Image (cartoon, helix red, strand yellow):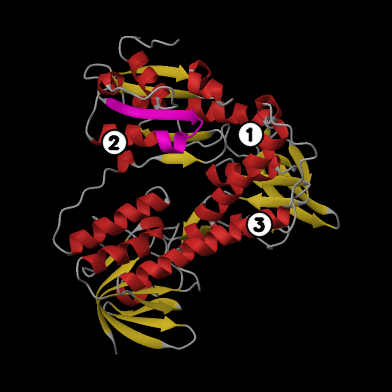
């Protein structure tokens, strides 16, 4: 029976990054992955393919809607959906192949199959061949899967998860999105740009509830300009597949029954930790109702078994899993890494993009933390106007007394990249004044961050 210093179960962003870091630190490491391709949900059926389609659909939309404003006449713009999907697959395959290369470069052993515990040091692999391997330490990084509603079960054809939504054969005529969170809005915006009618049905009275409310409202207005329809405060109760589509039943906030008819229904109400099949009972590890494993500093109650990413508490984000993967390995090796969970940024990759880090205004009010805020709209940005990208704003929240940055929230062009300035600043306990005093290149979108910081500092914004 082959023995390793570390066995990682799952080769998603958390697992493969942890494996590479452990190899860098001299460990003999093996990774067990049930998919043929490495990279987990993110690379195969999540982050990477969705961003490929988001970019392609936005370019198509711009060609139809705004190229003429730039003086670019492109008559009879056509959609080659088959080619768009092929490009998406090419991007996925290239990225997955890159992880294969990194495994070989770092001498990581890869096993294809389903890993499950025999005991704390023995892992059984069920695949093309069954075998057991030994491990001094084990890292669980099996990720998550879409949550299925008991009254709205996936059939893979009419009622679908994000996985199927990223591989459709044609653009739906009417896509009904159940859930107004990040995944539903991103995929819904893709198909809206490509010509589908899109209706978002959300149980809560607002979309993206985890983000700052003001940004959520701005994002909803932006998507409504794209002609996305929203049915908020509507609880879906079921669906009926008919010969020509799907009827979705729901109740509005007054309890009135309503129906929505579409040809595809995307259920995007969250994700559930993927811990089934690990045989955790064999080692005495328990999970909560979402399947998540309880950990203390990423360590389970079994001393040599660790868990990271979507299988533990916290936001189900690839970059959070990566940070936890590195931290877990370094702690195993006696180092003292650091993760500030308040500074894990969240992004919605619609266009314009929404991004957020730190406390929201509602959280500051609830926690009775004195704060001040500064806002700057992109319509006052010369760079944004030059690019016809003047939608959105930057919002900076700082402590009323100390001026320390408490949260930064934004909607606008390239906000997925702009948010990193705020993350770095907050990591170093910077103040709004610090950002306001930093020279930003002109003309750039990043100047809006500086101006919002100036607005939070004695209302000193220059360009508004």
Neighbor class of circle 2 (other Cα within 10 Å; few <14, some 14-19, many 20+) is few
Residue drawn at (29%, 36%), measured in percent from left and top?
Answer: 424
Please tell me in which quadrant of the rendered image residue 385 appears.
top right
- Mark 2 — residue? 424
| Residue 31 magenta-highlighted | no
Which span of residues is magenta-colored?
405-418
- The quadrant in which the C terminus is found is top left
Neighbor class of circle 1 (other Cα within 10 Å; few <14, some 14-19, many 20+) is some
Rounded to the nearest whole Å, what is the CA distance between mark 3 and mark 2? 36 Å
Rounded to the nearest whole Å, what is the CA distance between mark 1 and mark 2? 35 Å
* Image spot of residue 68 (x, y percent): 71, 28
* Image spot of residue 381 (x, y percent): 48, 19
Q: Is residue 401 shown left or right of residue 456?
A: left
Name which of mark 3 and mark 2 comes first in the sequence. Answer: 3
Is 368 in front, or is 375?
375
- Mark 1 — residue? 232
């Amino acid at each position: 029976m082959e023995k390793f210093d570390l066995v990682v179960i799952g080769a998603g962003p958390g697992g493969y990054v942890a494996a590479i870091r452990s190899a860098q630190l001299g460990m003999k490491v093996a990774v067990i992955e049930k998919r043929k391709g490495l990279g987990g949900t993110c690379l195969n059926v999540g982050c990477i393919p969705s961003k490929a389609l988001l970019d392609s659909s936005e370019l198509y939309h711009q060609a139809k809607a705004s190229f003429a404003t730039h003086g670019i006449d492109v008559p009879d713009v056509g959609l080659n959906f088959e080619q768009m999907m092929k490009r998406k697959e090419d991007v996925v395959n290239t990225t997955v192949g890159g992880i294969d290369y990194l495994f070989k470069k770092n001498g990581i052993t890869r096993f294809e199959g389903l890993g499950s515990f025999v005991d704390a040091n023995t892992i059984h692999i069920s695949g093309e061949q069954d075998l057991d391997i030994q491990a001094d330490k084990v890292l669980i990084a099996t990720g998550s899967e879409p949550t299925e509603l008991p009254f709205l079960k996936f059939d893979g054809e009419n009622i679908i998860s994000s996985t199927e939504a990223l591989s459709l054969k044609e653009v739906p005529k009417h896509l009904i999105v159940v859930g107004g969170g990040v995944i539903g809005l991103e995929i819904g915006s893709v198909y809206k740009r490509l010509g589908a009618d899109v209706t978002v049905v959300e149980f809560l009275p607002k979309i993206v509830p985890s983000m700052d409310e003001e940004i959520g409202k701005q994002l909803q207005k932006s998507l409504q300009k794209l002609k996305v329809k929203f049915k908020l405060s509507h609880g879906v109760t079921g669906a009926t597949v008919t010969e020509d589509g799907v009827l979705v039943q729901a109740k509005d906030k007054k309890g009135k029954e309503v129906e929505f008819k579409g040809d595809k229904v995307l259920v995007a109400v969250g994700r559930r930790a993927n811990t089934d099949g690990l045989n955790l009972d064999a080692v005495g590890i328990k999970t909560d109702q979402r399947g998540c494993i309880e950990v203390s500093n990423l360590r389970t109650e079994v001393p040599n078994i660790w868990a990271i990413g979507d299988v533990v508490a916290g936001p189900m984000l690839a970059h959070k899993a990566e940070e936890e993967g590195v931290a877990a390995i370094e702690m195993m090796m006696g180092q003292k890494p650091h993760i500030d969970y308040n500074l894990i940024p969240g992004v919605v990759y619609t266009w314009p993009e929404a991004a957020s880090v730190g406390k929201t205004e509602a959280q500051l009010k609830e926690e009775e933390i004195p704060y001040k805020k500064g806002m700057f709209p992109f319509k006052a940005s010369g760079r944004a106007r030059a690019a016809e990208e003047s939608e959105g704003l930057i919002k900076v929240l700082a402590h009323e007394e100390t001026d320390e940055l408490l949260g930064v929230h934004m909607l606008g062009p390239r906000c997925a990249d702009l948010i990193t300035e705020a993350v770095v600043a907050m990591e170093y306990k910077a103040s709004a004044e610090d950002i306001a005093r930093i020279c930003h290149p002109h003309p750039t979108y990043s100047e809006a961050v500086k101006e919002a910081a100036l607005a939070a500092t004695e209302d000193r914004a220059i360009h508004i």
